[in-house]
Amino acid sequence: MNSTLPSEEVGAKIVEWHSCIIASSYKDAALLKKEVELMLEDMEENDKLLAYYSLIEYRHQTMINGNNGILTNEIQFNFKETSLDHYLKYLYYFVSGQYEFNKKRYRTAVKMFRKAERLLEHVQDDAEEAEFLSYIGYAYYRINQYLFSMSYLEQAETAFRRLNFVKKALNCKQVLGAIYSELENYDKAELCLKEILEESTYPSINGITLRALGLNMFAQSNYESAVKYFKQSLEVKEHKKSYYGMASLADLSHSLFKLNDVAAALEVFKKAKEGALYHKDSEFISRCKFIEGAYIKKDTSVIDEAINELNSEGLYYEVCELAAEMVEISEEKGDNESALKYSKLAYRGRVNQNLIGDGQE
């Protein structure tokens, strides 16, 4: 005879599974996922718990596969307003924001996270709240809203340290270091990033931090030091094999072209372009196109195409950065007309950085 499990019992197991996902306990999360799936077969009918399960299952897939999860938009919340219903709504908006973030639709992600934030009081879990603070901080960073981003990331770092989630705390601190650099507070950025290297025992974080140090040096036109850090980042096996390794290759090739080390730059550039295409990353496909137009083909139409692509993606900091580089190149050539054109593009990128806007649907 088939027994029917109380939905509360299944819900408690999903909460346990969810906690393992937050803590990045891959093995325990996988075991609990199987337990939950078996329990669902015998669970009494409960649409709320099935909705909860579908959201947590998406978070599990995101943890395992990065941005390859699929989120259905068919989940509806037509229940009587209870504390659990508020929490389910929170989860819906949070996971929807996470999905948009993973698809690089950062403005839409911020919208979802802001809706989730209104329901944050119904999250009775410090780890879950810290996770939310970090995600909204990352999303604000990606749309260049630095003051908002820093506020959330500082809170998230403090919360993760209180919970002894050191790796997640260091992730927050690494983004804070990147923000200092983008705000041209280069000394503070370098100090912050070097503190991470002193504390971190995680190869993936070390690789990303070394790349961030390289970017900090590149922004100061210290290309020799930038090359050193990018090469060090690629010596970290876990970093080299990752998406961020592809990014380091692109940054390294760019720095080598700046140093006029053309032979080495071309060799690295080929790998970087292959990596960008392999990862289907629109930002770095456009960045490679820019490098190709500026330093290999010396073709402004290719450069303009790359900048326009970045602009259409809402990557205004990158537009500003590359347009400013073209101002410098044009001025060195005495091409005042082009310098003026790219100055206008850089200015427009700077203005757009300060607009949250309705953004990418």
Image: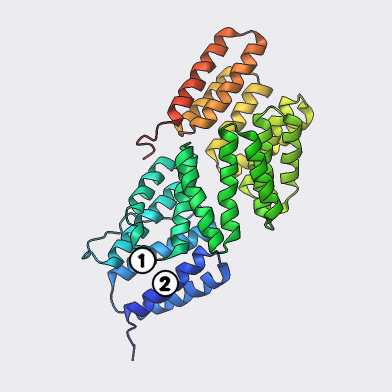
Mark 2 is surrounded, within 10 Å at the Cα level, by few (under 14), some (14 to 19) or many (20 or more) other residues, namely many
- When the figure is inspected, residue 231 is found, relative to residue 221, above or below; the finding is below
Residue type pointed to by label 1: Tyr
Q: Is residue 273 left or right of residue 95?
A: right
- When the figure is inspected, residue 78 is found, relative to residue 97, above or below; the finding is below
Q: Is residue 287 left or right of residue 111?
A: right
Q: Quadrant of residue 178?
A: top right
Give me the residue at 57% from left, 64% from top: 164
Could you tell which of marks 2 and 1 lies nearer the N-terminus? Answer: 2
Mark 2: secondary structure: helix
Residues at circles 2 and 1 in contact by the CB criterion of under 8 Å:
yes
Write down the residue under mark 2. 14
Q: Quadrant of the N terminus?
A: bottom left
Q: CA distance from mark 2 to mark 1?
A: 8 Å
Write down the residue under mark 1. 52
User: Mark on residue 38?
Assistant: none
Mark 1: secondary structure: helix
- When the figure is inspected, residue 67 is found, relative to residue 88, above or below; the finding is above
Residue 245 can be seen, yes or no? no
Q: Quadrant of the C terminus?
A: top left
Q: Quadrant of residue 12?
A: bottom left
